[in-house]
Amino acid sequence: MSIENDLVFYSSENGDQWLLVGGHDGSTVRHQPNASSGGNPRDMPLEEYLPREQNTPQGQALRTLLQAHGHI
């Protein structure tokens, strides 16, 4: 899957979003906190994110997306 634009793959009830971000160095997962939390976005390489977050709703959503596109 070639990512040319940021792709939101999960949004939580409190407004946080998780995005798959493409780049020259590979894909990155970005956690974008909701505006009211005042938190800063956090990026993590895809290969680190998948095993770390595999049992979370956002990790499962990303795995489902990747499987649907034949990447897992």
Image (spheres, rainbow, N blue to C red):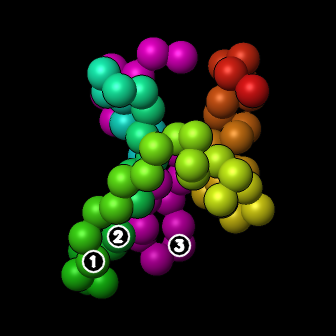
Which portion, as a residue range, is magenta? 1-18
Q: Which mark is residue 64?
A: none
Report whether residue 7 is seen.
no
Q: CA distance from mark 1 to mark 2?
A: 6 Å
Q: Is residue 14 above or below residue 61?
A: below
Mark 1 residue type: Gly
Report whether residue 48 is seen.
yes
- Disc 2: which residue: 33
Q: Position of residue 39 (x, y in %)?
A: 27, 77
Is label 3 in a helix, a strand or a loop? loop
Residue drawn at (52%, 41%) of the image: 46
Mark 2 residue type: Pro
Is label 2 in a helix, a strand or a loop? loop
Residue drawn at (46%, 77%) of the image: 14
Residue drawn at (70%, 52%) of the image: 51
Q: Which dot, 1 or 3, sits closer to the camera? A: 1
Quarter of the image where one finds residue 63: top right
Q: Which mark is residue 13?
A: 3
Mark count: 3
Q: CA distance from mark 1 to mark 3?
A: 16 Å
